[in-house]
């Protein structure tokens, strides 16, 4: 077989195995949900206390934060009640207002698949019902936290399924909840299912299109954390989510980025990520992602293996991790190491 034939065969193999969930034979093409949230047109046409409202598509998170700082409580509540979908997703808006707005937005959606997110005990920092649904949930006290971590999941994650009871430590919410408990009360952890993830194994999972769209949203989300005074975050990316983190990191103030079960980061080395964050990588001995060819050809595949010595990432112990999703199971060495990184204690 010639060089081109070998490259095509390798790319085809990558399509067959790169994804966040093992065992699927194919995946549907997904349309990335991007742009400002639903309700933006009505928001743009409105005023409060005689002021125009910041445009969700163009205003920076810092401009949004300054806008809300200049409002009294009555004006803030007016915006929550009249425009919950916008306020709930507006990076830079006060955290408590976003929690309140998103509870109203979930209820207003009228969709039973999202109903559990409306519980008053939940801290929903973002909610978008479009497509399969996107959500960000906070575990811990974000307003008082000394440390913040953001967990970005891989394929098959959305607002309806991300906190499935069958995945208490392996789904996005389960991972974030487990990390927060391990790190302690001074750490807040966000389960960020804030982008359109691939479904199953297919072209979406092998390509970078959805990751690129997700990286823009993740970078803006972290800007919003900074705008409300949260500590610089640690970004955790699982499987396809590691690709999102890798593409976003250079545009964030993250202190560290941790990738686990990663198919590659679309860079040849850690230095090639062009981020000031420290780069960490973990892979368990039975993780099927090790069988993914570390190639990038014609836009397919995600490149070099981040746990290889030549990549230059710091290795996280993961010898007791089972499978592709067991990295945050209580008692594992990887969870203990992740908690230390989240708290700034790892060197």
Image: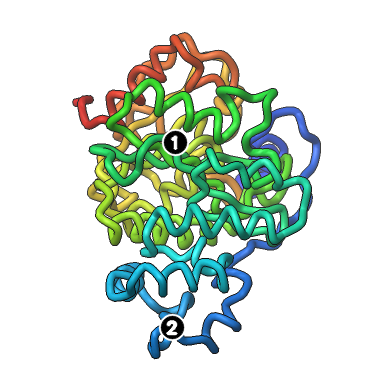
Q: Please, which colouring scheme is shown?
A: rainbow
> Can you give x and y, in whole percent of width and height, for residue 74 in the image?
41, 71
Tag 2 or tag 1, which sits nearer the N-term?
2
> Can you give x and y, in whole percent of width and height, for residue 34 in the image?
58, 67
Occupied quadrant, residue 332: top left
Residue at mark 1: 139
Q: 33 left or right of 225?
A: right
Q: Is residue 5 visible?
A: no
> Can you give x and y, in whole percent of width and height, for residue 152 in the image?
49, 42
Q: Residue at x 59, y 18 (%)?
A: 323
Q: Residue at x 54, y 89 (%)?
A: 45
Q: Residue at x 46, y 62 (%)?
A: 216
Q: Residue at x 69, y 61 (%)?
A: 108
| Camera-nearest residue between 252 and 7 | 252
Q: Which label is found at residue 156?
A: none
Residue at mark 2: 48
Mark 1 lies on a secondary structure that is strand
Q: 52 left or right of 67?
A: right
């Amino acid at each position: 077989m010639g060089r081109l034939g070998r490259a095509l065969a390798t790319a085809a193999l990558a399509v067959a195995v790169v994804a966040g969930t093992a065992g699927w034979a194919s995946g549907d093409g997904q349309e990335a949900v991007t742009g400002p949230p639903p309700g933006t047109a009505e928001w743009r046409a409105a005023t409060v206390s005689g002021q125009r409202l910041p445009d969700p598509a163009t205003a920076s998170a810092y401009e949004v934060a300054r806008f809300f700082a200049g409002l009294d409580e009555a004006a803030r509540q007016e915006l929550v009640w009249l425009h919950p979908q916008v306020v709930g997703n507006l990076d830079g808006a006060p955290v408590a207002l976003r929690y309140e707005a998103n509870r109203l937005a979930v209820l207003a959606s009228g969709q039973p698949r999202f109903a559990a997110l409306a519980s008053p005990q939940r801290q929903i920092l973002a909610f978008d019902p479009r497509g399969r649904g996107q959500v960000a949930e906070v575990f811990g006290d974000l307003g008082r936290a000394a440390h913040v971590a953001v967990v970005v999941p891989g394929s098959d994650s959305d607002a309806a399924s991300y906190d499935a009871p069958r995945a208490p430590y392996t789904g996005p919410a389960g991972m974030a909840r487990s990390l927060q408990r391990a790190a302690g009360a001074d750490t807040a952890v966000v389960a960020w299912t804030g982008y359109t993830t691939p479904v199953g194994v297919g072209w979406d999972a092998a390509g970078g299109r959805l990751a690129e769209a997700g990286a823009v949203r993740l970078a803006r989300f972290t800007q919003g954390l900074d705008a409300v005074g949260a500590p610089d975050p640690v970004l955790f990316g699982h499987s396809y989510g590691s690709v999102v983190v890798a593409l976003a990191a250079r545009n964030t103030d993250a202190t560290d980025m941790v990738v686990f079960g990663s198919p590659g980061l679309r860079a040849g080395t850690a230095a090639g990520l062009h981020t000031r964050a420290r780069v960490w990588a973990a892979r368990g001995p039975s993780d099927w992602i090790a069988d993914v060819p570390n190639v990038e050809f014609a836009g397919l595949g995600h490149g070099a293996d981040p746990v290889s010595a030549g990549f230059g990432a710091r290795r996280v112990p993961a010898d007791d991790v089972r499978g592709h999703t067991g990295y945050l199971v209580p008692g594992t060495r990887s969870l203990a190491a992740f908690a230390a990184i989240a708290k700034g204690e790892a060197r």
